[in-house]
Amino acid sequence: MATAALSGFSVMSLLSLSYLTWDWMSPNQAENQSAPDSANRLPAAHPPHIIFIMTDDQGFNDIGYHNSDIRTPTLDKLAADGVKLEQYYIQPICTPSRSQLLTGRYQIHTGLQHSIIRPRQPNCLPFHQVTLPQRLQEVGYSTHMVGKWHLGFYKKECLPTRRGFDTYFGSLTGSVNYYTYNSCDGPGLCGFDLHEGETVAWGQGGKYSTHLYTQRVRKILATHDPRGPPLFIYLSFQAVHTPLQCPRRYVYPYRDMANVPRRKYAAMVSAVDEAVRNVTYALRKYGYYQNSVIVFSTDNGGQPLSGGSNWPLRGRKGTYWEGGVRGLGFVHSPLLRRKRRVSTALVHITDWYPTLVGLAGGNASMTEGLDGYDVWPAISEGKESPRLEILHNIDPLYNPARAGSLQGGFGIWDTAVQASIRAGDWKLLTGDPGYGDWTPPPVLPSFPGGWWGLERHTQPRKSVWLFNISGDPYERLDVAEQRPDVVKQLLARLAYYNRTAVPVRYPMEDPRAHPDLNGGAWGPWFGDGEEDTWDGVSRRRIKDRKETLKMSRTKSFFRRLNARMMSNRI
């Protein structure tokens, strides 16, 4: 399980590596110092067609090649004939993963390091940052997005068609009904959310979104000339995010699966598998396949409460344990030099930006401040990954851990702050990483509703964890007390990254965003040329942090009381 870049190093030699000092090279510096050999690149005559497929909330254990209970023959075959990425990291929730894919930057460098972008927040990707599709447009690509956006829409300038996509068809918010495309942000705060370009697609609802989005991708392929400008298609499925909705024919093969949410969830995964089969069939039918690169990725870990599974990894969606941040990923392409293998090269979702720009014949070094690396030689040829470190995140607004302090961080870092970093084989977590249990796939038809909220949610009385993630991928052996030397090194890296962070962008919700004030649909509500008037951080969020501290003791008492009562009941 060790990363290719660090295999063979002892612990002491690892600690002496320069990347654990202040002389850390940025991805751009590394690229300039040792540009990839031209032999590693594809011919410039016709750059490849790039199909990036992202699923939503699909867990590490929710694909056939990790779990035979899930039927995904197409995904299994594509992965088996391509390169499986088994050390591939994403973010624990939706907006951050999508922002990092399109900008090639960590959240701390976009201001989106806290939570998601809510439908009524006047927030979106920073306007000054050049997105991946914009870079691809510059080198002649025809760019198209189909599916879930979830990167803000309060101004027209935030919309996909203003951020590098020639066409867009999909939903702007984080969750919609799969048939009606109704999206709610609270009681009485519901609106229609299906868009064609920059207009509401009122007449196109009623069809299951996985099918509708697949149909649109096939239409793009059918109407484009594969010998013309190369295509970049970003297919961002809504599936398998809640609500758990799926045509019955996909549920029937799982009729013996007793747990109803798991059964529906598995059916939704199979519907995605069929959709990918139809897309790859269209690539072959219309003449794209031989010069195509297909990237498959999930956006974050699965949610066990909604049928997902990250077993045997620890944690779930929304946490910085491996179950929240280690993702499903593979690359399938006739252009791969070494196929049919499993890669343990360290890869992060920010790496797709420079990797795909490089494949397209562009120069990623033109974009300053990237946190991603060009990992194509590692994927295609099995070379060592240039990536040795991943900053999972630093969230200064998340509820601080009561057990954390600057003193507990050796005066280097306030361990009350939620943060996580991986360097080589080591992974450090501080603050409150989130729900930290190991949750097997649900098999019982039902269980007492409060069972999931027992001691497993009790806040641990500590704020620093250290794991040798290569030797202990399930995060069962915390060695923070045994290796304070490693802890100090990684705390120093967090402090370094924190000095490069931009202010958090998390504004208060704007009542003008209500769909009832915008024709019954979600969409931009700021006027043309209207200036932002917020200061970046929601005042409600600051108040919530204070209230959380006051309520934590009360919650802890009732949680323990509930645990004793439920234990007797079980």
Image (cartoon, grey):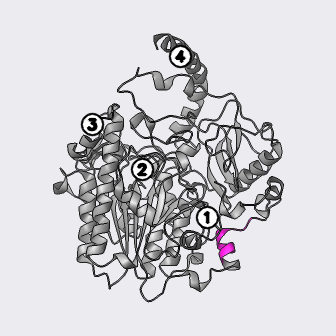
Q: Which mark is residue 563?
A: 4
- SS category of the residue bearing label 1: loop
Type of amino acid under label 1: Asp
The residue drawn where x is 64% and y is 35% is 400
Residue range (magenta):
24-31
- SS category of the residue bearing label 4: helix
Horizontal arrangement in the rendering, residue 11 relative to residue 328 (left or right): right
Q: Are marks 4 and 2 in contact (CB under 8 Å)?
A: no
Please state the horizontal and vertical placement of residue 377, each as a whole percent of the image.
58, 73
Which tag, 3 or 4, sits closer to the chain's start? 3
The residue drawn where x is 67% and y is 56% is 2
Horizontal arrangement in the rendering, residue 330 relative to residue 395 (left or right): left
Q: Does 315 appear above or below 102?
A: above
Task: Give how far apart the Cα atoms at labels 3 and 4 are.
Answer: 33 Å
Type of amino acid under label 4: Ala
Q: Does 192 appear above or below 260?
A: below
Task: Give how far apart the Cα atoms at labels 1 and 2 are.
Answer: 29 Å
